[in-house]
Image (cartoon, rainbow, N blue to C red):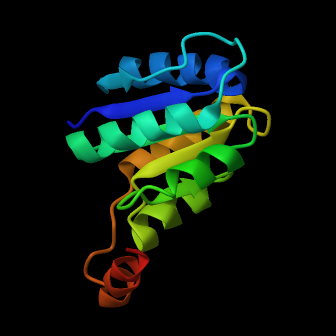
């Protein structure tokens, strides 16, 4: 099983810690690249750290900030990162099936911890529909 890289800013710190524990309990290996407290910090720093590690390790990432918007915007500036801001299980499944998303973005001020858990599980357990050539063609157009 591949590792999962996780990062947050101060607003997402508590949810990050919660998800780390839940995912570890499920046998997932976690690489935490920060932040390490709920002290104010700049989310793009942690988005970049996570993206670098995701590309290096060829694994999934989870980014968390207040709404998930800032993290998704910062992450999607990195070539070969396909970050999806998901607020529902269906969005997470579709992000993987159709877009081969490799980074999940969550909003700690938007989601309850149990919702975030379900969305993360859906994202991490879904497969990309590589048999559907139109999805592959569209993804290749990103870069």
- The single residue placed furthest to the right in the displayed view is 109
Percent of width and height locating residue 5: 38, 32
| In the depicted structure, whether residue 96 falls above or below residue 5 | below
| In the depicted structure, whether residue 140 falls above or below residue 109 | below
Percent of width and height locating residue 16: 56, 23
| In the depicted structure, whether residue 6 falls above or below residue 24 | below
- In-front residue for pair 101/46: 46
Percent of width and height locating residue 88: 66, 53
Percent of width and height locating residue 26: 36, 24
| Image quarter (top left, top right, bottom left or bottom right) of the N terminus | top left
Q: Residue at x 44, y 70 (%)?
A: 99
- In-front residue for pair 47/138: 47
| Image quarter (top left, top right, bottom left or bottom right) of the C terminus | bottom left
Q: Residue at x 39, y 56 (%)?
A: 126
**Going by the image, does 85 lie left or right of 78?**
right
**Going by the image, does 23 lie left or right of 28?**
right
- Which picture quadrant has residue 80? bottom left
- In-front residue for pair 62/72: 72
| Res. 26 visible in picture | no
**Going by the image, does 88 lie left or right of 18?**
right
Q: Residue at x 38, y 77 (%)?
A: 139
| Res. 47 visible in picture | yes
Q: Residue at x 62, y 54 (%)?
A: 73
């Amino acid at each position: 099983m591949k590792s999962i890289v996780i990062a947050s800013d101060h607003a997402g710190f508590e949810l990050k810690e919660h998800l780390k524990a839940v995912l570890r309990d499920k046998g997932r290996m976690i690489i935490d690249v920060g932040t390490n407290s709920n002290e104010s910090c700049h989310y793009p720093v942690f988005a970049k750290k996570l993206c670098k590690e995701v590309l290096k390790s060829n694994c999934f990432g989870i980014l968390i900030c207040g709404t998930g918007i800032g993290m998704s915007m910062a992450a999607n500036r990195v070539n070969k990162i396909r970050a999806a801001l998901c607020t529902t299980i269906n969005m997470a499944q579709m992000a993987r099936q159709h877009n081969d998303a490799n980074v999940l973005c969550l909003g700690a001020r938007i989601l309850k911890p149990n919702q975030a858990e379900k969305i993360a599980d859906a994202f991490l357990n879904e497969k990309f529909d590589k048999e559907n050539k139109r999805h592959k063609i569209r993804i290749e157009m990103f870069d």
